[in-house]
Image: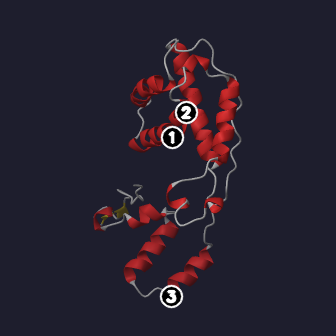
Amino acid sequence: MDKTCREFFEKWLPFIARKKRFSPNTYDSYRCNLDNHILPYFGDQIMSAITAENIDQFLDHLSQKPCKGPKSFSREPSEVPKLASSTIKKCYMILMSGYTTAQKWRYVKKIPETIAPAERNKRRKAWASDQVYSVMQTIDNKVLHLAVHLAFVCSLRAGETAGIDISSIDFQDKSFWIKRQIQRGFG
């Protein structure tokens, strides 16, 4: 009952990742949220001493926290957006998932009773077929024309489109496979 949050989560994350067979991206997401948000706030606190009020204060803290990385580059501090509601909810879900295991492992007697934060979904803008057709009429480069066409027809993300190469196409089977994607790097 005297273990810190950091001690618990450093033991918990590899365990839960193996148990639930996390993909590398899922593991990285958990690791990133722990390192950037949860552990800086709760890391040195005794896990069993954290209350529902502390968790609610943490969620409020996250809602006021400015983004880092590409969203903050070349912007005045007042113009930097706050963390997305999806990030805040993900941190909450990681924290509460950890508490479930912490109770089983007897790190805590009781899981703090809190309510999950609301998540505001933003609609992503997408081109209509007539807009894609109009753009494709102006493209002279055959490779770019093909990339735009594939991106629209296959509903590809930008990173998936950028990751296309000749090995993605199986001419004998007449199929197309997304084998890799380009991701932006931080750091």
Residue in the picture at 60% in, 72% down: 127
Choose between 125 and 147: the one closer to the eye: 125
Q: Which residue is identified by label 3?
A: 138
Instruction: Report the colour scheme.
Output: secondary structure
Which amino acid, mark 1?
Answer: Asn
Residue type of the residue flagged with mark 3: Thr
Relative image position of residue 152 (x, y in whole percent): 52, 69
Q: In this rendering, would 162 be left or right of 93? A: left
Q: Quadrant of residue 97?
A: top right
Q: Residues within 10 Å of mark 1 (few under 14, many from 20)?
A: some
Q: Position of residue 178 (x, y in %)?
A: 38, 58
CB-based contact (under 8 Å), mark 2 and mark 1: yes
- In the rendered image, the vertical position of residue 72 relative to residue 61, given as above or below: below
Q: Give the answer, above or below, for where 34 lies relative to 136.
A: above
Label 1 with label 3: CB-CB less than 8 Å: no
Instruction: Identify the secondary structure beneath mark 3.
Output: helix
Amino acid carrying label 2: it is Ile
